[in-house]
Image: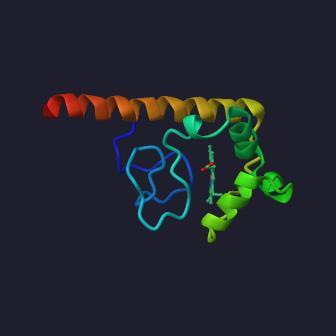
Amino acid sequence: MRPSGSASPFHGSEPEPITQITGRRVENEVIPDLLDIGARRERAWLSRYVAEPDRMLADGDAIANELFAHYRNVRMPNLGLSGDDVAALLAHIDAESRAVSERARKSRAFAR
Ligand code: HEM
């Protein structure tokens, strides 16, 4: 498990302030927070978006269009990922998201 504040495996090399799945809110957000993304989007949509965000935008997908409008300065590139890569990434994000809520639950229990 990565300590929060270390570089994320996602979204490039910049260590701060972009930590995608640590549960921290990012100010001046330039790319989306992927925490709990598996609960916020349909699985089929997510799988396709991670595989080919450019095509989804070109095809006029409504959510891809909203993201495009919101994250005006950066476009998610098509990373040429295989289906297996995409499945492994989404499983990893789900596991990290569960770990974040488990840590939050424990620290709330500790604070009592
Ligand atoms: C392993 C690699 C990656 C995964 C699993 C991933 C996952 C995602 C997901 C699921 C979304 C949609 C978020 C939502 O629905 O709210 C998204 C959007 C986005 N991602 Fe990624 N991403 C990856 C790599 C990258 C890289 C390398 C960049 C480069 C800057 C990037 C930039 C963005 C941006 C800017 C958006 C918002 C949509 C847009 O403006 O294009 N992502 N990403």
- The spot of residue 34 in percent (x, y) is 53, 45
- The spot of residue 79 in percent (x, y) is 73, 49
Is 110 left, or right, of 70 in this rendering? left
- The spot of residue 35 in percent (x, y) is 48, 42
Please give the count of numbered marks on the rendered protein: 0
Is 51 left, or right, of 22 in this rendering? right
Which quadrant of the structure image shows residue 81?
top right
Which quadrant of the structure image shows residue 71?
bottom right
Which quadrant of the structure image shows residue 85?
top right
Farthest residue, direction front: 62
Farthest residue, direction left: 112
- The spot of residue 52 in percent (x, y) is 78, 48
Viewer-proximal residue among 85 and 40: 40
- In the rendered image, which quarter contains the C terminus? top left
Tell me what residue is drawn at x 61 percent, y 34 percent. 90
Tell me what residue is drawn at x 68 percent, y 60 percent. 66
Viewer-proximal residue among 30 and 63: 63
- In the rendered image, which quarter contains the N terminus? top left
Tell me what residue is drawn at x 56 percent, y 41 percent. 37
The colour scheme used here is rainbow
Farthest residue, direction bottom: 73
Tell me what residue is drawn at x 47 percent, y 48 percent. 8
